[in-house]
Image: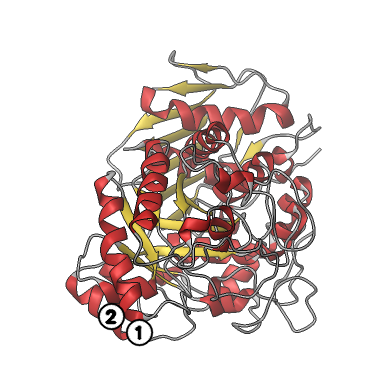
Amino acid sequence: MTETAPSPQELVPQPVQVHPIPNATFTLTPDTKIVLATEAAHHPAARLAEVLRPSTGYDLEITTEPSSNAILFDTGETAEEGYELDVTATGVTIRATTPAGHFNAVATLRQLLPPEVEAKSEQPVEWRIPGVRIEDHPRYPHRGAMLDVTRHFFTPDQVKNYIDQLAAFKINHLHLHLSDDQGWRLEIKSWPQLTNIGGRTEVGTRTGDFFYTQAEYKDLVEYARARGMTVIPEFDMPGHTNAAQSSYANLNADNTRRDPYTGIEVGFSSLAIHEDITYEFIEDVIREVAAITPGPYLHIGGDEALTTPDADYEAFMTRALPLVEKYGKTAIGWHEFIKTTTDTGPVVQFWNQTTADENVAAAAKRGTRVILSPANRVYLDMKYTEDTELGLKWAGVVEVRDSYDWDPGSYLEGVPEDRVLGVEAPLWTETAETPADLEFLAFPRLPAAAELGWSPRATHDWDDFARRLGAQARRWKVQGINYYRSPQVPWQD
């Protein structure tokens, strides 16, 4: 039976303030209840119960009736997404202004319980939680992870598993890369060949029904929402479009279908920029996807359109961007697109390896918000070392310290702290075929990116982070996460 509760000093991401309360441990028992003082906390409370019930074997009834042995979800005067968490000898109290704050508190509370709490079966453990007062809120509102389901397809259940892993580190946006040269991954009812043809292939030789129906997509969106996460769908354009062009001849300037593509080269495809049918196609996609996406964003890609002349690229964006707004969404695009507009509404996602970009800096000066995803820092698909089996290295090798040791608030010249919307860690899947592959590439770099998006700049310290990260190994072992044992980290097995 575990006798020692985890330390409040081992949390990832690092909270704003942590005040341990010596000799004030609370222990979950079969009589412990989860009490709602606000109905707004229903989903976070349900998620907590969902995690705790299998491993503890306790009922953990969710009730609105007061209890002397309880985890209490209450309201509080906290920052947006912030929370206060008090653990005393008599109970746990969570205060937050919004459900997002309650979700974030749940992520912290899980790490204060013994690692065995993550097990899917009952464990012989004393469920002790150390006494502590935590006051916490995020540095940035956008803390994202992108999953590429086009280079290799991942089933709805596999995506849900990744969502659960992300939510544990207060990631609040899941960016799904749903179209590329190798595949089209979401049913578009007005253009059925996109999945009938474009949804059959991926990198390599495997073929199948590699797409989500709209019902499956809506289920994924709801699953993410029930964990405090917003889904951002991406349909890349005008390049990275071979799957669409292999599905419909009239999306090509020469009116000839392209052959399906299963390699990993980029930059060779482009929609027919000067044909009205192209924009009818784009509008239909945006209209259907916006209708089943409750979140505020729709990502239009825009990167690596290497065969599209600059004038054509600008003409395309001039027609495509307003379509996103027409259907009530805010556009996000890879940073190349911002050279075509002075509109400050769309959000720029910067992915390059440089620390300066004149177009992004000019946009930020006008008021545009920027998501930072520098490839040589937080692209989770880069190799850790030259000898790492999985991953690519066009942006260099990226060890966990490389992912952690940079400051989003001062990283990109001309982009001040107040224009940074947040940090997002993309995971492209040219070399990742299984959930174990995703885990190996994401862990431990994903928690590093999560901390950069959440924790105050003043807490940024590699040695301290490495120590706290090493303490996660016991939890990941219980969860069966296939993480990379970086020699930079003092793992605590």
Quarter of the figure with residue 420: bottom left
- In the image, 122 versus 238, the foreground residue is 238
Marker disc for residue 275 = none
Residue located beneath label 2 in the image: 361
Coordinates of residue 341 in the picture (x, y in percent): 23, 70
- Image x and y of residue 140, in percent: 36, 60
Q: Secondary structure at mark 1?
A: loop
What amino acid type is highlighted by mark number 2? Ala
Closer to the camera in the image, 374 or 430: 430
Task: Locate residue 34, reporting x and y percent.
Answer: 52, 23
**Residue placed at 80% from the left, 60% from the top?**
205
x then y, percent, for residue 445? 62, 67
Residue 15 visible (yes or no): no
- Looking at the image, do the residues carrying marks 2 and 1 touch, with CB atoms under 8 Å apart? yes
Mark 1 lies on residue: 357
Q: Left of 230 or right of it: where is 348?
A: left
Quarter residue 434 falls in: bottom right
* Viewer-closest of 397 and 346: 346
